[in-house]
Amino acid sequence: MKKSFSLYRFATALVLLLSPLVVTANESDWAKFLNSPTETTHKTLLQDLKKCKNVTRCKEAPSSEAVVKLVKLVETKNSYAVDVAFLSRHLHLLDGGNLEDVNRALGRLAESDPTLLLSHLKKYRVSGRSFDSTLVMLPLETVDDVGAKRRTMQKRIDSLSTVSDQSLARERDNAILVLKRKLAKLQSENKGTQPDK
């Protein structure tokens, strides 16, 4: 009994000692990409991420600090960062506030670079609730401002309407439909509560 307990303690100590090495290596791939989002660092990180099945078994899931950096890169319309964000969502590596922050950043692309957004929605075959949440996740500053929510929705609709690439027509039309439904819902729920400015 004493011998097996000692072996257990040794094995536990070994796991605890080696665990930081695994985490550091994975964080390093994220750090390399986030510090220099190039084709090479993108490719390396994608290879690591594609090995993941879900967040509980994936040591490559980003830390909250990494997500903050990823969001900033997405907001600058960095195509490699957008791709990593979509793949991370697709592999269910994000949850809670991290998922919301990434969705919010991706949603802003509907206004700033609708073609980039639509091409990734198509590439990752985003559909259903995930498709909708990407489009309707609004900036935090609109939370208590119904007029700002309406204006943001309309701006996204207008921006998406400018995409003429026929290979993205299905995604564009579906995105516009989702946003129009959300806008109509906002208008019917909040009629007369806050005028648009």
Image (cartoon, rainbow, N blue to C red):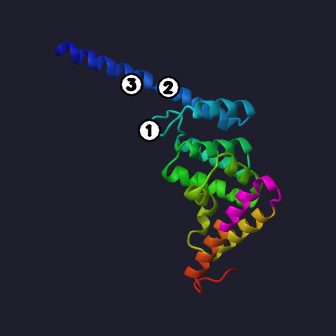
Which quarter of the picture shows residue 38?
top right
Q: CA distance from mark 3 to mark 1?
A: 18 Å
- Label 3: state its secondary structure: helix
- The residue identified by callout 1 is 56
Q: Residues within 10 Å of mark 2 (few under 14, many from 20)?
A: few
Q: Residues within 10 Å of mark 1 (few under 14, many from 20)?
A: few
Q: Mark on residue 16?
A: 3
Residue 149 is inside the magenta segment: no
- Residue sitting at x 71%, y 53%: 117
Question: From the image, which quarter does the N terminus lie in?
Answer: top left
Whether residue 51 is situated above or below residue 78 in the rendered picture? above
Stretch in magenta: 163-177
Mark closer to the observer (2, 1)? 1
Whether residue 14 is situated above or below residue 48 in the rendered picture? above
Q: Is residue 86 left or right of residue 3?
A: right
- Residue sitting at x 81%, y 56%: 166
- The residue identified by callout 2 is 22
Whether residue 146 is situated above or below residue 157 in the rendered picture? below
Q: Residues within 10 Å of mark 3 (few under 14, many from 20)?
A: few
Q: Is residue 113 visible?
A: no
Q: Mark on residue 140?
A: none
- Label 1: state its secondary structure: loop
Q: Nearer the viewer, residue 91 or 10?
A: 91
Choose the circle earlier in sequence order: 2 or 1.
2
Three-letter amino acid code of the residue under disc 2: Val
Q: CA distance from mark 3 to mark 2?
A: 11 Å
